[in-house]
Amino acid sequence: MIDLHTHTVFSDGELIPSELVRRAEVKGYLAIGITDHVDFTNIEHILSCVSKARYLEEVLDIRILPGVEITHVPPQKIAPLAALARKLGAKIVVVHGETPVEPVRPGTNRAALEARVDILAHPGFITLEEAELAKENNVCLEITSRSGHNITNGHVVRMASLAKARMVVDTDTHAPKDLIDSNRAVEIAMGAGLSQEEASTIVNHHAIFPSGVE
Ligand SMILES: [Zn+2]
Ligand SMILES: [Zn+2]
């Protein structure tokens, strides 16, 4: 299981990184992205904290990717914040997309795709044109196990499939119960309309680690 979208107590998650990673290890994770919510006010603090979680790599067989989820930042400010995140060492840059269950500003999906972030999380009713931009700019579109955000998974899969954009399954974990194993990740992708073969390919040959985690 590779999951590149999770939260800790440094934003609105329940666990500190060490417990999150231990619980992920028990679920069979090979890699985990720790991507707490950021804007221009807290990004230095978050990246400084989550980067320290890499100490666990010295003793565990799990790859830890410190990152950020750019959340409710006005679209015009997403590209400069994504650039700052990279400069500060973020290994994964996620943007909190236009989920239908929160008042995310219209234009957020497009701004994330133009900024060439790694993952556009829960992109809601993404348009085909945006999915084509995701393909062009190599941005992964997220299929999410998170309740609420997951109501548009079927739509996201349809648009991503038409555009041949890359897809990833993430949990957006905030609490221990949110972590899943790879079988459940395959089921979530199949529930969103992919065949078993397509779902297994996405989960087992992850778009960001196509040949496996080193
Ligand atoms: Zn959150
Ligand atoms: Zn999130």
Image (spheres, grey):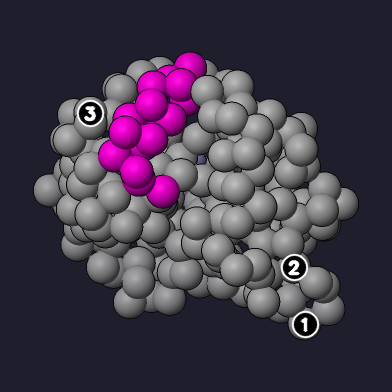
Q: Residue 58 carries which label?
A: 1
* Disc 2 residue type (three-letter): Ile
Q: Is residue 135 above or below residue 99?
A: below
Q: How crowded is mark 3: few (under 14 residues within 10 Å), some or many (20 or more)?
A: some
Pair 2/1: label in front: 2
Instruction: Identify the residue at image location x=55%, y=63%.
Output: 210
Instruction: Identify the residue at image location x=57%, y=47%.
Output: 202
Measured Cα–Cα span from mark 1 to mark 3: 43 Å
Task: Give the structural element (helix, strand or loop) at label 3.
Answer: loop
Residue 91 versus residue 13: which sits nearer the camera? 91
Q: Is residue 177 above or below residue 212?
A: above
The segment highlighted magenta reads: 149-166
Q: Earlier in the sequence, mark 2 or mark 3?
A: 2
Pair 2/3: label in front: 3
User: Residue extending furthest bottom?
Assistant: 58
Find disc 3 in the rendering and name its residue.
127
Q: Give yes or no for residue 157 being in the magenta stretch.
A: yes
